[in-house]
Amino acid sequence: MFISIQLKNGWKVNSVFVFPESYGVGDGAYVWDSRIGTSSPYLNVRWWPEWFSNLYYKFFVRIVWPKGVPDGLVVP
């Protein structure tokens, strides 16, 4: 996800998460690759669903603002 997206103005990826909204037997997902500490919010998730499962997953890419900007907003 977000293969070619780049954050601008010094914003960086701080952490990434993926987790199910509900739990099923044998179902799951985990973060395989990410670019924490860079301006790329790229996220590669690996899945192993069971047949006929019906799970929903959420993912989060937490970004942080540049140092020296107290509220994260850049005002011209």
Image (cartoon, grey):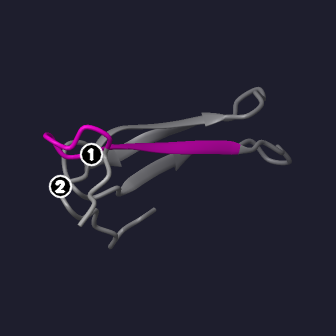
The amino acid pointed to by label 1 is Trp
Secondary structure under the numbered disc 1 in the rendered image? loop
Image quadrant in which the N terminus is located: bottom left
Q: Quadrant of residue 32?
A: top left
Left or right of 58, for residue 76 = left
Examine the rendering and report whether any part of residue 48 can be seen: no
Q: Which residue is mark 2?
A: 10
- Crowdedness of circle 1 by 10 Å Cα count: few (<14), some, many (20+)? some
Q: Residue furthest toward the bottom?
A: 4
Q: Residue furthest toward the front?
A: 76
Q: Residue at x 28, y 62 (%)?
A: 7
- Residue 66 position within the rendered picture, expressed as x and y whole percent measured from the top left: 19, 46
Q: Residue at x 83, y 45 (%)?
A: 54
Secondary structure under the numbered disc 2 in the rendered image? loop
Q: Residue at x 50, y 47 (%)?
A: 46
Is residue 70 found inside the magenta-colored segment of the image? Answer: yes
Left or right of 44, for residue 27 = right
- Asked if the residues shown at circle 2 and circle 1 are in contact, with their CB atoms under 8 angstroms apart, the answer is yes
- Residue 29 position within the rendered picture, expressed as x and y whole percent measured from the top left: 56, 39
Residue toward you, 17 or 65: 65
Left or right of 60, for residue 57 = right
The magenta segment: 57-71
Q: Residue at x 26, y 57 (%)?
A: 74
Residue toward you, 64 or 75: 75
Is residue 29 found inside the magenta-colored segment of the image? Answer: no
Q: Is residue 11 above or below residue 62?
A: below
The amino acid pointed to by label 2 is Gly
Image quadrant in which the C terminus is located: bottom left
Q: Which residue is mark 1?
A: 65
Residue toward you, 68 or 39: 68
Distance from Cα at disc 2 to Cα at disc 1: 7 Å
- Residue 25 position within the rendered picture, expressed as x and y whole percent measured from the top left: 76, 26
